Image (cartoon, rainbow, N blue to C red):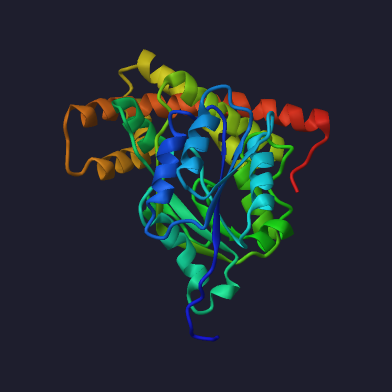
Amino acid sequence: MSGSKLTIGVSVIATVLNEEASVGVLLESLIEQTRPPDEIVVVDGGSQDETVEVIERWRRAGAPIRLVVMPGANIATGRNRAIAAASHEIIAATDAGVRPTRNWLAELVAPFERPGGEAVDVVSGFFVSAPGSVFELALGATTLPLVDEIDPARFLPSSRSVAFRKAAWARAGGYPEWLDYCEDLVFDLGLRQARARFVFAPKAVVGFRPRTSWRSFFLQYYRYARGDGKANLWLKRHAIRYASYCLFGPLALLAGIWYKSAWLALFVAVAGGVYLARPYRRLLAQTQVRRDRAFWAALALVPVTRVVGDIAKMVGYPVGVYWRLRDGRRAT
């Protein structure tokens, strides 16, 4: 009835692979939601640790979990399988390795249940850094946006925190199973192309722990950029990065050699300030109460993490482009 609140069923989906240390945290957070899920569908891609056993223990304890084991399934395939198996029209997607706030699902579902909610196809949640070390604090400031940086009209949500109708998922063609990384971004673009109606829910937040080592961080951003290359995404953005390093790198080197040139030093300082302004602003926002040793250590690490991430992207993108040209694949 027009003007009345709808009550809808919601299936939460997630894919896991060797997540014995984190999947219990996720399931506990979901069960303790102020608006608990009607069911949780988990697809395991063939874990070699105790992930499946942990999930089964929660299921036997009464959690509304449906477990599907698909050895070798990538993330996109697992998500599509979970959605197909889900009992409800509204799908909320998340990942192992995150901790939803207690109101996460309530905030995601609210736009569907409000008067006029039948016109909503997608609700974009948000995610924030939940660092466990100085390195992770610096990494979160470097890589994860603040909510006030988001333009709701253009925001493409991560599948760590998003809800959508099954019908919209079908119209968009599902998650792209040919793509190993950036699958949620391509799915978002498919939803946009299918004219899905998006709503931004900034309070539907999950805490996301950044990578814990330089190696895992480099590999993560290498894979993200390789996915961009495979899917033919963000050519202009990557071209600007290459051009910036080709220009700024030699100038920074010259400034070190020709240190008496005040103008060159000033240019390098200003360019460096612009380059680091956004991550430093994020770091200040995250540590506005505590400015302890961790803050100062993270302050020093931010430039290094920015450069390492950029290098990883510049290495990964052409690998993805080569794959796309070789295989003749194009994002749709």
Snapshot quadrant of residue 74: top right
For this view, does 145 lie left or right of residue 282? right
For this view, does 134 lie left or right of residue 330? left
Question: 38 or 126, which lies in front?
Answer: 38
| Residue 191 percent across, percent down from the top left | 66, 57
Q: Residue extending furthest bottom?
A: 2
Question: 46 or 200, which lies in front?
Answer: 46
Please tell me how many numbered marks the rendered image carries. Answer: 0
| Residue 223 percent across, percent down from the top left | 59, 29
| Residue 250 percent across, percent down from the top left | 48, 21
Question: 237 or 293, which lies in front?
Answer: 293
Residue drawn at x 40%, y 25% as measured from the top left: 212
Snapshot quadrant of residue 290: top left
Q: Does residue 120 appear in this view?
A: yes
Q: Residue extending furthest top?
A: 257
Q: Does residue 144 appear in this view?
A: no
Snapshot quadrant of residue 283: top left
Question: 216 or 277, which lies in front?
Answer: 216
Residue drawn at x 70%, y 61% as measured from the top left: 194
| Residue 242 percent across, percent down from the top left | 57, 30
Location of residue 48 with respect to 324 vertically, above or below: above
Residue drawn at x 64%, y 44% as measured from the top left: 79
Q: Quadrant of the N terminus?
A: bottom right
